[in-house]
Image (tube, grey):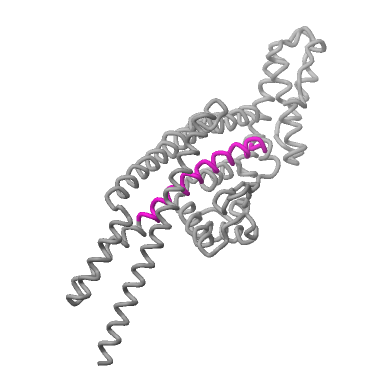
Amino acid sequence: EEKYRLRAAMRPSFISEPLARQILLIGKSINFLRKSCHQVQYVSGTEASARRIRSLRYGEWDALEDLVSESAGRTNKALVTLLFERFRFKAHCEAIRRYLLFGQGDFSRHLLDLLGDRFRSGARTAAAAHHSLTGIVETALRASGGSDDSDVRDRVHVSTMEATAGDDLFSVFSLEYKVDPPVSSVITERAMRKYKRVFNFLWGIKRVEQALNSIWRRASALAQVGTHAVLAGEADRAAYRELQAFTLRALSKGLFASMNQQMQHLVTNLQYYIMFEVLEHSWSAFLEAMDAAEDLDALIAAHQAYVDRILERALLTEAYEPARRQMDRVFKSILDYCDVQAQVCTQVERQVARVHSQGREKERRDAER
């Protein structure tokens, strides 16, 4: 936008401002086709238009406007068609939606599971090798079963954020999508930074959801330890009942279930709002604007409006920064809660292991008698 502008003092009096802007748009489109798209023979009919221009006489303003409108329509159509067909603009937008905005649910699930395995294996910091994270993303892409070709998948890259004290792998992990010219003239670096902001927010929600589900499964399994008592002898049944009482006391099962349910309710409703009320509605509006775009400026404006709509409705703009910080504190509180519950579960698992070990030792001694 800053490269091209109208200089009002140099505009001839017989050229209206709307007509001048239309001529400017034609020039911008032609230059974009040649410089960015490397398309010299961009449209048919230009020679005929040139002959008509040379045949115009002074005072034929209506004919001039008709000629400019015709040239604008032809040039802009050639440019937009080239962006969609040769440079696959829509395919790139769909890929960003699937992978950075989690439109393809199985991709985010595979990604969380793979990163969770790496987290549990000891790679808990940002010092984890970048190529290993890249391998995880590639595995998740293949496992998700997407129909994208290799060119689209190869554009999804790992982007780790700067780590601070206490940050783990989940905190610094991020994704980005690489686009080349001329698509980068529409999906600009500024737009990609906005996409990344949305990804980081969605990633935080997914991380909290996974933590809650994981600790719930772990604690629920431990709470069922005493059910094995029906298969044991009288003495062992007493030991199992005592063990079950211990696990239930340690896990405070009633309170734990209630708190977990409330937190799950919050995360589920937040995810529903973001995925459907924000992302799906914004995407539908963008598709309509994309199909209606008749020139490069309209396409750029449609994409900018799409990204800005997501940020606005997801409360990720500066105007909603207080609410965003409050949400971060809520997420952190939930993760802290899950960490405490994990420590309790670890203690219970050790007690369960001791009881089982004592039971096996007793069986061994009885067998030796």
Q: Position of residue 271 (x, y in %)?
A: 42, 41
Residue 215 among those drawn in magenta: yes
| In the displayed structure image, the side of residue 306 where residue 236 appears, left or right | left
Q: Position of residue 327 (x, y in %)?
A: 47, 36
| In the displayed structure image, the side of residue 109 where residue 233 appears, left or right | left
Q: Position of residue 364 (x, y in %)?
A: 30, 86
Q: Quadrant of residue 71?
A: top right
Q: Quadrant of residue 319?
A: top right
- Taking depth in this image into account, of 316 and 359 the one nearest to the observer is 359
Main SS, magenta region, reads helix
In the displayed structure, 184 sits above or below 342; it is above
Residue found at x 73% / y 21%: 23
Number of marks in the rendered image:
0
Q: Residue furthest bottom?
A: 369
- Taking depth in this image into account, of 101 and 353 the one nearest to the observer is 353
Residue found at x 46% / y 44%: 205
In the displayed structure, 360 sits above or below 67; it is below
Q: Which residues are magenta?
A: 187-216
- Taking depth in this image into account, of 296 and 350 the one nearest to the observer is 350
Q: Position of residue 124 (x, y in %)?
A: 56, 58
